[in-house]
Image (cartoon, grey):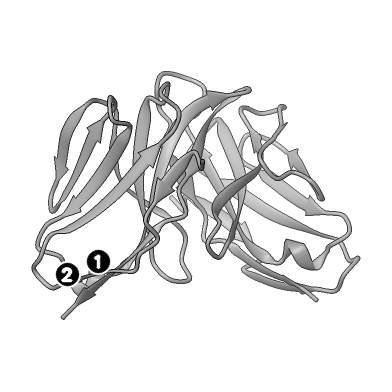
Amino acid sequence: QKEVEQNSGPLSVPEGAIASLNCTYSDRGSQSFFWYRQYSGKSPELIMFIYSNGDKEDGRFTAQLNKASQYVSLLIRDSQPSDSATYLCAVAARRGSARQLTFGSGTQLTVLP
Amino acid sequence: NAGVTQTPKFQVLKTGQSMTLQCAQDMNHNSMYWYRQDPGMGLRLIYYSASEGTTDKGEVPNGYNVSRLNKREFSLRLESAAPSQTSVYFCASSQGTSGSIYEQYFGPGTRLTVT
């Protein structure tokens, strides 16, 4: 079992719809969770992080965390074509001498005009 | 602030050649990381440096060495390049050792091809 799992997609949604991206993780001791957006040929860009159970909203983005079920999700409201990218889920843990992130393989999102 | 910078942006090597990838950050971060990204594999940690003067192996360290030159700079060296090292390499940094700050910020990447 991978430590962090995401559906690879591709996920297609029409413009204006809600895009829902999901991620599950295996380490129950994980404390911090991150969503990165990566456009084709570019580097990952941090868009959201969440530490506590429940929802965290930032503009059109909402991160949801359920530690009991070991999943974290990202909702994108009013999806725009510019949201088309690969979304990486990352889970943090302290290993060795530093805090490290374990990344999922990403979900490719396409927003259709 | 430039954030995290990497050089070069692109590189083609022949099998057996060596090279060093350079990374620098101007955010006064303590921790720095090197990842590789291959299609369908996500980001995999090669080496990291929790603070100046320390380095540790990540998930896929074989064939690589690193140097934390100072707080700002962290380099990755391929001593004898192999085709399996064809990948996109990202450097990242984070505040690191204090509190619960885990967010990592990435450089633009180096696209390396080994023929």
**Residue B45, percent across and down?**
61, 44
Residue at the location (34% across, 45% down)?
Answer: A23
* Chain bearing mark 2: A
Name the residue that disc number 2 marks: A80
Q: Residue furthest top?
A: B99
Give the quarter of the figure containing the C terminus of chain B.
bottom right
Quadrant in which residue A79 is drawn: bottom left
Q: Amino acid at mark 1?
A: Asp
Q: Chain of mark 1?
A: A
* Numbered marks: total: 2
Which type of secondary structure does the marked residue at label 2 adopt? loop
* Left or right of B96, for residue A34: left
Q: Position of residue B1 (x, y in %)?
A: 43, 50
Dividing the picture into quadrants, the one containing residue B15 is bottom right
Location of mark 1 (residue): A83
Local SS, label 1: helix
Q: Residue A45 lies in what quarter of the image?
A: bottom left
- A91 sits to left or right of B40: left
**Callout 2–callout 1 Cβ contact below 8 Å:** yes
Residue A74, given in percent of the width and then of the height, sits at 24, 48
Residue that lies at the very extreme toward the bottom in this rendered image: A113
Instruction: Describe residue B74's horizontal placement relative to residue B42 as left or right.
Output: right
